[in-house]
Amino acid sequence: MGAHTAEQPAPVTDLSVPTRTGLLIIGASQSGVQLAVSLRALGFDEHITLLGDEDHRPYQRPALSKEFLQGTVESESLIFRSNEYWAEHNVDLVKGEYIVRIDKEADGSGVAHSSSGKQFPFKRLALTVGARARKLEIEGGDLDGVLYLRNADDALALKARVGDAQDVVVIGGGFIGLEAASSLQKMGKNVTVLEFGPRLVGRAVGEETAEYFLQAHRSRGLDIRLNTSARRFTGADGGTSVAAVELQDGTVLPAQIVLVGIGVIPNTQLAEQLGLTVDNGIVVDRFALASDGTTVAIGDCANMPNPVPGSEPGERIRLESVNNAIEHAKVAAYSLTGRREEYAGIPWFWSNQADLKLQIAGLCNGYDRTVLRRDEERGKFSVLYYRQGQVIAADCVNAPLDFMAVKNALAKGQNIPADAAADPATPLKTITTDS
Amino acid sequence: MPTVHFTDAAGAVRDVQGNPGDSVMETAVRNGVPGIVAECGGSLSCATCHVFVREDCLAQLPPMEDMEDEMLYGTAVDREDNSRLSCQLRLTDELELFVTTPETQV
Ligand SMILES: Cc1cc2nc3c(=O)[nH]c(=O)nc-3n(C[C@H](O)[C@H](O)[C@H](O)COP(=O)(O)OP(=O)(O)OC[C@H]3O[C@@H](n4cnc5c(N)ncnc54)[C@H](O)[C@@H]3O)c2cc1C
Ligand code: FES
């Protein structure tokens, strides 16, 4: 969590007169911002308080491991909306307040209490509290220089150290780890990635894509070690800064920075305290309502019914992506304005690593066949995933046309016959059929 | 100061002053110009920052790279000859740009 210094004017609530904001949004990031914006677009005219614990104006996270880390974009470019926008739209932005407890009535109203002792009364509540980095609890884990990358303060801490470091060990071969590793390598660091599992990006992509990324990164000089884990971190001569990583097999790798990217844990503490149902995230229905029927919960913190049209009834999912934060926020905005609109959509995700642009359309869970499209010469690579002959997802590397074709086909309920898709010279758009 | 004139699909116009160096997309999003979604924040991955550039303004803009060209085939409203992705258009000191936003971006 960010430091809670007071660089910020006093928050909206004048405690002598307990006013009640119409909607209190806890968590001022991708999903919280989108909720406020969508509500105003729908004509919601109650006062909104958008509150977060970070000391920064709400910003986009994806660049933190990419352009921002490499210094190709400035922090100002990451800010979602100008101050004038919030003022014009009657949204109070509260920074640097961490909510520790909420008292709530059955009608949905209540009061949130922050760690600095402030109170934020509300008529309705939205939890957009996201997720936090999973910690690696091993010896030396608290040494200076063992870092995580979830928010702007983390990115600033990492950037501040990069100049002095020669060797970086990244723990975790998922998206964040690989993005940061390629960024740091590009900045001239000697980077080693340790992945505990037998392949990269274990959860998110299929076998072929994982293998493609492994080869691509290795050929670009990244040292990636699979089936490898760290035993402990050590400081130099008993110092407090990390100097090396000792692996399970006894190998010692020098490291002035260790970046841990081993996944996230949804922030469910407030939901638990409120007695809401929690199961790998705050459990919500198709309308983004939590188990009390009044609180909305969206984005990385929410466990929701699978939004993909035609998915198994009762199937639940927690998604960590910008696209989901945006789409889920729209559903919550409808809910809060009394409309019942279900979240139905084709989730998509992107990741930029070195010169590899990965775009994923759909969810590949439960596939029974894959079709590979590989254009070696032009550095393009796609995998299409099929279930019972129907395309359900695609991983596309440097192949926006394939990505767009699959995303559009899925959105329209169309199919791309597997046999015809195998030839990379055939544009997918031309063979798409109305299933 | 660079100025971008945004016309939406229904014909409503918004004039926004921007900072040199910022992209047209950033200028739109920060000021809440409707019609620009920009999910990917400018990393050329989403095609939801599509604009139609007024013909006489096209020449002032940087040429299109292959990736932008490919992404433009996936826009929600079909591309035209004057289509660009606004995250790839940087404001310069004296730029005065007229663009129209499509009816939908997703
Ligand atoms: C480095 C990085 C790179 C990424 N790259 C991509 C990418 O390329 N593509 C993509 O689609 N997605 C990417 N993501 C994921 C994407 O950023 C998240 O899915 C998205 O930010 C989720 O938004 P959210 O609002 O649900 O949660 P978050 O962004 O996590 O926001 C939650 C906010 O709530 C605050 N908060 C939590 N508890 C409290 C409390 N009790 N009181 C007050 N405030 C609180 C938190 O500090 C935080 O500011 C990336 C994420 C990271 C970290
Ligand atoms: S903002 Fe995503 S492509 Fe322009």
Image (cartoon, coloured by chain):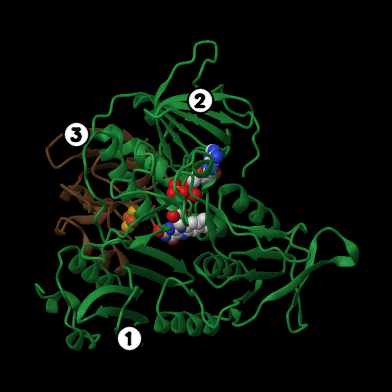
Q: Going by the picture, which residue comes out furthest to the left?
A: A434
Colour given to chain A in the rendered image: green
Q: Quadrant of residue A95?
A: top right
Q: Residue A190: x, y in percent? A: 67, 74
Mark 3 touches mark 2? (CB < 8 Å): no
Q: Residue A141: x, y in percent? A: 74, 62
Tell me which chain the residue with mark 2 is part of.
Answer: A
Q: Which residue is mark 1?
A: A374
- From where the camera sits, is residue A60 visible? no
Q: Three-letter amino acid code at disc 2?
A: Phe
Q: Secondary structure at mark 3?
A: strand
Mark 2, residues whose alpha carbon is within 10 Å: few (<14), some, or many (≥20)?
many
**A82 sits left or right of A182 in the view:** left
Tell me which chain the residue with mark 1 is part of.
Answer: A
Q: Residue A20: x, y in percent? A: 43, 20
Say if labels 3 and 1 share a chain: no
Position of A202 relative to A22 (above/below)? below
Q: Secondary structure at mark 2?
A: strand
Say if labels 3 and 2 share a chain: no
Between marks 3 and 1, how big is the CA–CA gap?
45 Å
Between marks 1 and 2, how big is the CA–CA gap?
55 Å
Q: Residue A416: x, y in percent? A: 17, 78
Say if labels 1 and 2 share a chain: yes
Of labels 3 and 1, the one closer to you: 1
Q: Quadrant of residue A332?
A: top left
Q: Which residue is mark 2?
A: A120
Between marks 3 and 2, how big is the CA–CA gap?
38 Å
Q: Three-letter amino acid code at disc 1?
A: Arg
